[in-house]
Image (cartoon, rainbow, N blue to C red):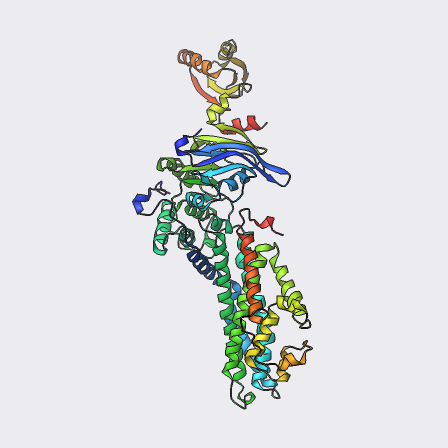
Amino acid sequence: MTTTTNSGPAESGMPRTAPGLSVLATTLESARQTLVMLRYRRILLIAPIALLLLFVITYVLAGTARSSNGANLYSVFAWWGLATVIVPWVTLFLGVQAVHGELEDRTSQYLFLRPVSRVPLLLGKWLAIATVSSVLGCCSAAVLFAAVAGREDLWPDGREPWLLVSFCIVLGIGAIAYSAVAVFLAAIFRRPLAWAAFFVVGVQMLAANLNVSAGMRQLTITDPLRRMTLDLIEPSRRLARSLWPAERNEALLVENGTGAFRLEFGSPICSLLILIVICLTIGCWRYARTEYESRSRD
Amino acid sequence: MSDSHSIVLEFDSVTKWYGSVAALLDVSFQVGNEVVGLVGKNGVGKSTLMKLAVGLLDPSQGAVRVCGSDATTRESRARIGFCPDFDRLYEPISGVTFVAWMLRYHGVAGRAATERAEEVLTELGLAENMHRPIREYSKGMRQRVRLGQALSHRPQFVLLDEPMTGLDPVARAELADLIRGLPQRGVGVLVSSHVLHELEAVVDRVVLVHQGRLLADGKVDTLRDQLPERPHRLRLKGARLRELASQLTAWPEVDGVSFLRDGLEISLSGHGAFYERFSDLASDWQGGVHELIPLDDDLAAVFGYLVE
């Protein structure tokens, strides 16, 4: 250890008190650092093995379902396996770990002492989680498609790559929304994983299956995603019933091209956008408070 | 007190409440281009004071300023370096990456940030290990990384919370030299430590906090002199101790003399006059006076007296 650590700024040409980064640069830097840290997460290290297992299991299951057709089988697997289970849980887990983990072990203090706003720090984390989860979701959808497409007899009219594209779009949007919820839960609550479980099991599973007149469905992620899926893949009535078994409104099941992606109030994409904005706004507001500590939450 | 032209940290009648509990009450002090020690038992408000100083807490009353700016502003954070006492870092990445990442938020570009991080960690003695993952580091190495991130952006005010923890004796001595050298480069330092003799060796003055209040602020010897009700105690070793004791008890500034196994313990009321008289006595004393050591002039003793 020598004693020149704080040698004068002129010696290195670096300003003594360098200005902090801009909002955009801070967001990108925070996202970059979060992505690098995510590389070391065990859940991502085992992702290739999990994808391989997913391929094998799907391929075997597809072989036993000879009465079905490939498009229906893939849609059911992708919806019930990926969109309602894997993507929500993986995204919420990664998001909660990225934000809440740093608050709990106090390493977030290193960030809070930097001359940057905390809002872009949190937005950067959200961006990183959304990116990773979207990529994971798309990879899973591709692996699943490859496994089902491997059974040639299930596709008498030829394979339908549009299904893969559709589910990639839906899973990507879902990952972005779930990341926002993860960031919100991690910034607000002291036990965000428990709240995440409540969100997925309680809010999603129950509220998303309420009658369409119940406005609560608009507050979930599953319901808008499902309507987007139906809009994109334009399923038969039988497939629509498989994807949406609790729906009592028969008209909705056969209705295609409902404008799920139209940017108007009440449309599924608009509902998700509102949910994302609300989650991020509240999360950032809480995260940016000066006296922000793990123990002060809840 | 510090020179008002170079104040880097200022607490101005700061009070901090947690609900109905007062963590700090009307605390005022300043830190200039000097090393100031922060001393206090656990739970007396030291951590609150530090968090206020680095802008992680807002004062309930009063103001905390860093280089003239409110401590919670970005301008202040750009001027502060903080070495916390908790032992958590970004475990999977290397020390140099961690320091460079923190530098990036100060607006230092990627390559320059890495070069500066390497420079700081090399100077802190981590040259050989700085590219290894932090999770493989010893406690001392981790402490150097924490120090590195606090110093890398060349702050004007550095707050070090238990910086000696985990360091070996050689590294402690080197760190003490480093801390002592910071004021010469225009850096004010507030350092806390439970190892009071080590703290005493590096600080220009101390701030003593007890039960949320500022108990004392000043140089250790000045504070000691402000405790007249506490007689100074000395240990003396030499020849012909009985005769020496009988002579000393006759002096008005000597309150009492007691025999130890191998010397005398002397209690003084006026130690300035005592030293003048004693130097004459010792030079003529047959057989010689071998040792005269103050027993309670150090920071630990002063701190103990003040909080009793």
> Would residue A45 be seen by someone viewing this image from the given angle?
no
Is residue B203 shown left or right of residue B307? left
Above or below residue B134? Residue A149 is below
What percent of the width, then of the height, locates residue B295? 50, 24
Front-most of A161 and A145? A161
Pick the residue in front: B116 or A161: A161
A112 w.r.t. A236: above or below: above
Where residue B61 appears, as percent x and y from the top left, is 56, 37
Does residue B35 appear in this view? yes
Residue A9: x %, y % from top left: 33, 44
Query: Residue sitting at 38 percent across and 52 percent down?
Result: B107
Total numbered circles = 0
| Residue that protrudes farthest toward the bottom in the picture | A156
Q: Is residue A102 above or below residue B59?
A: below
Q: Quarter of the image for the N terminus of chain A: give it.
A: top left
Q: Tell me which corner region of the image, top left, top right, bottom left or bottom right, holds residue A62.
A: bottom right
In this rendering, the answer to whether B215 lies above or below B81 is above
User: Which residue is farthest front?
Assistant: A264
Residue B72 image offset from top left, x and y in percent: 49, 44
> Which quadrant would residue A151 be assigned to in this image?
bottom right
Tell me if A248 is positioned left or right of A45 in this view.
right
Which of A282 and B215 lies nearest the eye of the viewer? A282
